[in-house]
Image (cartoon, rainbow, N blue to C red):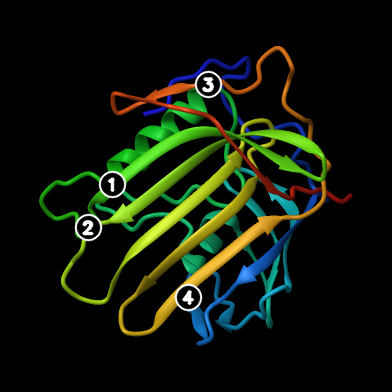
Amino acid sequence: MVSLTASQVWGYSSEITVGTEIEWQVDAAPSDAFNMFYTGGGDWLAENGSSMTFSVINIGEDVEGHFVIGNVPVISNDTEIAKDLTLGVWGLTEWWPGLIVDVGQTAIHSLNATAYASAERVSGNYLNGTMTSRYENITVANTLIECIVFDFVQDYSGFGEPQETQLAYSMGSGVLVSANTSYSFGVPYNLQIRLLESGFPPVSPTIGIYPILIAGALLAVVVVVYGIGRRN
């Protein structure tokens, strides 16, 4: 598991306000329509290269906003959106970080602990598997963003294709920087998104990224390129 220090203890970043608009590019989407049951958005289809947007309209326990992907516009909170898009794990302990997570030491520790619990190999958890977490510096439009990245690989169940999900969140803004999730229960599902434009604070030069100890192994930091944005 990840261990870190941070000045903020809990809560959404001050960068997330009513009116904040976040835009992702859809790099891959399923060719079949999938139902957005939790948000009530109906069946959605999106073209590769299209945009996915979320405009914040209320901030409470979850962040509520106007969400658009492909042919579906809907008003919902980011947890329900995550469930509909399989951006998380349906474990015995459910883990749905959403599109925006709380930032700060306490919040990140809680997020990390729940992630590992969702994949735990215990009786009744049909989504048990392997969960890992790490830090990465992700470069977005020439701006270095400090992120926490989660990788989940479900154990083979004997039917279909196991779920594999990677989610990366900005440590500063809490925004989902990139996602790649897939599974198959007969109909293949795969969604890959990445944030566009740079608008959130960069990595602090006094903090930066450092190697972390995960499950007893020292992992090196990786630098990849994606996009992150905000519009008012």
The x, y position of residue 183, in whole percent, is: 37, 70
Which numbered mark, 2 or 3, is in the foreground of this view? 2
User: Which residue position is annotated with label 3?
Assistant: 105
Closer to the chain start, of discs 2 and 3, is 3
- The image quadrant of residue 142 is top right
Label 2 – label 4 distance at C-alpha = 26 Å
Spatial distance from mark 1 to mark 4, Cα to Cα? 27 Å
The residue singled out by tag 1 in the image is 130
Kind of element beneath mark 2: loop
Q: Nearer the viewer, residue 38 or 6?
A: 6
Q: Is residue 49 above or below residue 148?
A: below
Pointers 1 and 3 in contact (C-beta within 8 Å) = no
**Going 18% across and 67% down the picture, which residue do you hit?**
157
Question: Is the Cβ of the residue at disc 1 closer than 8 Å to that at disc 2?
Answer: yes
Q: Residues within 10 Å of mark 4 (few under 14, many from 20)?
A: few
Tell me which numbered mark, 4 or 3, is placed earlier along the sequence: 4
- What residue is pinned by disc 4? 37
Image location of residue 32, percent across then percent down: 50, 87
Residue farthest left in this picture: 123
First reached walking from the N terminus: tag 1 or tag 4? 4
In three-dimensional space, the C-alpha distance between marks 1 and 3, rounded to whole angstroms, equals 24 Å
